[in-house]
Image (spheres, rainbow, N blue to C red):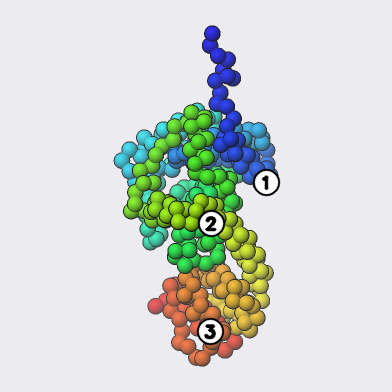
């Protein structure tokens, strides 16, 4: 006699339970309105497929609708076939709608390499789909391992606290789309196990083994070496570091935001910063104020070198020449640091 259908369902294993709990915790924390639509960013790999299965299970129980969006980067032969396979898996999990979007990565060139360019293309597509479908948020399958790699890359590049804080559990795209990362406390090995436990067959992206990508080298060689030489737990430690730094960065960012009005002054053809107001703050707040004003007013992101050069106009003024920085010209006029669009 055939087994009852319920008997053929995959059992609730520790890996499956951990993923569902992580998703449920984040959904509960967000307090979405009933019947809100959430979309899972699905590549078909183990991380996103395991996330899709967890969301398909938890979302209806929270009174929410769950769908999936698959981005075809068109960077590999047969990418459309891979995207359609992922779409079929999403449908089999009960996700609806299931949307496939092809993007042209070259149109989003950031100048920071192929990984950053592909990421920008992907996030732009997520943003557009979320807007089109009035989705409350997009869930991304970044894991604890991804977080550790991000922090390690930031350390190697000499990045600041905001970069070392890694990926936030909740963030927004430049256009305002809500991004959720419920798996930042889950190891990649757990997503692989969760797929196996639920008889899901993930796609193996050949780019994940291509040593021409910096992140692959970090994953395959650098972290492995650190674990061998320093002992297990390096990835967990890096992820904890990111969490602690993110808490600190959020406080410092909030303090800087509260001080904006007292720092900004009007100058003809641009914006100004009060020298005395900047001098009253610590370097951590002062540098944040400088970066925030220039990013907001001129859509320019300053390097640390450029930020410190501007700060010198406050801390060490001795008649320096104007600074010609990307997109802007900065110089001191008496008690004001003037910032104007660079027309040269």
Q: Give the numbered dot on residue 89.
A: none
Q: Closer to the camera, 317 or 174?
A: 317
Say which element carries label 3: helix
Q: Nearer the viewer, mark 3 or mark 1?
A: 1
Residue shown at the point (56%, 76%) measured from the top left: 271
Q: Give the numbered dot on residue 238.
A: 2
The image position of residue 162, as x and y in percent, is 55, 63
Say which element carries label 2: helix
Q: Are marks 2 and 3 in contact (CB under 8 Å)?
A: no
Check disc 1 and report the residue beneath it.
Answer: 29
Q: CA distance from mark 2 to mark 3?
A: 36 Å
Q: Are marks 3 and 1 in contact (CB under 8 Å)?
A: no
Please tell me whether residue 144 is drawn above or below residue 165 in the rendered image. above
Quadrant in the picture for the N terminus: top right
Image position of 321 (left or right of 5)? left
Query: Does any portion of residue 218 appear in the rendered image?
Result: no
Check disc 3 and report the residue beneath it.
Answer: 313
Q: CA distance from mark 3 to mark 1?
A: 44 Å
Q: Nearer the viewer, mark 2 or mark 3?
A: 2
Q: Closer to the camera, 165 or 250?
A: 165
Residue projecting furthest to the left? 77
Residue shown at the point (61%, 60%) measured from the top left: 244
């Amino acid at each position: 006699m055939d087994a009852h259908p319920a008997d053929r369902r995959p059992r609730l294993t520790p890996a499956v339970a951990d993923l569902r709990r992580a998703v449920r915790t984040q959904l509960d924390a967000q307090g979405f309105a009933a019947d809100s639509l959430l979309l899972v960013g699905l590549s078909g790999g183990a991380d996103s497929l395991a996330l899709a299965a967890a969301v398909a299970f938890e979302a209806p129980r929270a009174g929410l609708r769950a769908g999936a969006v698959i981005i075809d980067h068109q960077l590999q032969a047969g990418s459309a076939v891979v995207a359609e396979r992922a779409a079929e898996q999403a449908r089999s999990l009960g996700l609806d709608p299931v949307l496939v979007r092809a993007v042209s990565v070259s149109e989003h060139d950031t100048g920071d390499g192929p990984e950053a360019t592909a990421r920008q293309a992907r996030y732009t597509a997520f943003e557009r789909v979320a807007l089109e479908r009035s989705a409350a948020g997009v869930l991304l399958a970044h894991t604890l391992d991804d977080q550790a790699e991000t922090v390690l890359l930031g350390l190697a590049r000499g990045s600041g606290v905001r970069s070392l804080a890694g990926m936030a559990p909740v963030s927004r795209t430049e256009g305002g789309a809500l991004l959720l990362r419920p798996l930042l406390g889950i190891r990649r090995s757990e997503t692989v196990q969760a797929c196996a436990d639920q008889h899901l067959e993930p796609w193996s992206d050949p780019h994940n083994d291509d040593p021409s990508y910096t992140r692959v080298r970090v994953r395959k060689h650098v972290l492995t070496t650190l674990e061998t030489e320093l002992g297990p737990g390096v990835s967990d430690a890096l992820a904890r570091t990111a969490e602690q730094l993110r808490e600190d960065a959020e406080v410092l960012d909030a303090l800087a935001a509260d001080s904006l009005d007292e720092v900004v002054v009007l100058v003809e053809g641009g914006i100004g910063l009060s020298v005395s107001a900047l001098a009253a703050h610590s370097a951590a707040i002062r540098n944040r104020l400088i970066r925030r004003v220039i990013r907001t007013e001129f859509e320019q992101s300053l390097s640390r070198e450029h930020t410190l050069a501007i700060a010198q106009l406050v801390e060490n003024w001795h008649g320096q020449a104007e600074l010609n920085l990307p997109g802007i010209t900065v110089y001191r006029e008496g008690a004001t640091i003037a910032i104007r669009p660079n027309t040269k």
